[in-house]
Image: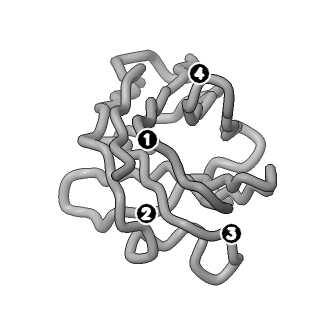
């Protein structure tokens, strides 16, 4: 079974950058999708960005133009480059994975992803 471990979180000032990593052990034999989700205290988990094995990507409007998701198949690692960070980006960030390629209607929906990492905290101060 695929297992995911996130890293790269930390505390930064507004306008700063972080790069999150999600290391995967095991692999899918066919097409698959992976995504980044975040959850702040008192709020529901929301999709941030997702990518699939066909190199398709999708972003939440709130991070479009600031965040970049990428998959490195040689390292079995998913990345999220976060630039121009804002205080509202503060949350626990989770990596998730599922079989199948991205579909716009569900790509950023947490309920469609059965495999999750433990999360990494991102805190952006003003």
Image coordinates for residue 119, horizontal then vertical, percent = 29, 40
Q: Residues within 10 Å of mark 3 (few under 14, many from 20)?
A: many
Residue displayed at 64% across by 26% down? 83
Residue furthest out toward the front? 29
Q: How far apart, in angstroms, are the residues tagged by discs 1 and 3?
A: 20 Å
Residue to which mark 4 is pinned? 15
Label 4's element? loop
The residue depicted at 37 percent of the width and 42 percent of the height is 93
Q: Which residue is mark 2?
A: 46
Q: Secondary structure at mark 2?
A: strand
Query: Eyeballing the image, is 38 above or below 74?
Result: below
Whether label 1 touches label 4, CB < 8 Å: no
Report the side of 84 relative to 43 (left or right): right
CB atoms of marks 3 and 2 within 8 Å: no
Question: Real-space Cα distance between discs 3 and 2?
Answer: 16 Å
According to the picture, the residue beneath numbered tag 1 turns out to be 26
């Amino acid at each position: 079974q695929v297992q995911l471990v996130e890293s790269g979180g930390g505390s930064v000032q507004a306008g700063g950058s972080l790069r999150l990593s999600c290391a995967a052990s095991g692999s899918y034999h066919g097409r698959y999708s992976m995504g980044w989700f975040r959850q702040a205290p008192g709020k529901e988990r929301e999709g941030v960005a997702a990518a699939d094995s066909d190199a398709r990507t999708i972003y939440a409007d709130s991070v479009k133009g600031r965040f970049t998701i990428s998959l490195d198949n040689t390292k079995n690692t998913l990345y999220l480059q976060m630039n121009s960070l804002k205080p509202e980006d503060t949350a626990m960030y989770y990596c998730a994975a599922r079989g199948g390629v991205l579909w716009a209607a569900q790509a950023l929906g947490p309920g469609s992803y059965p495999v999750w990492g433990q999360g990494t905290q991102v805190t952006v101060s003003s």
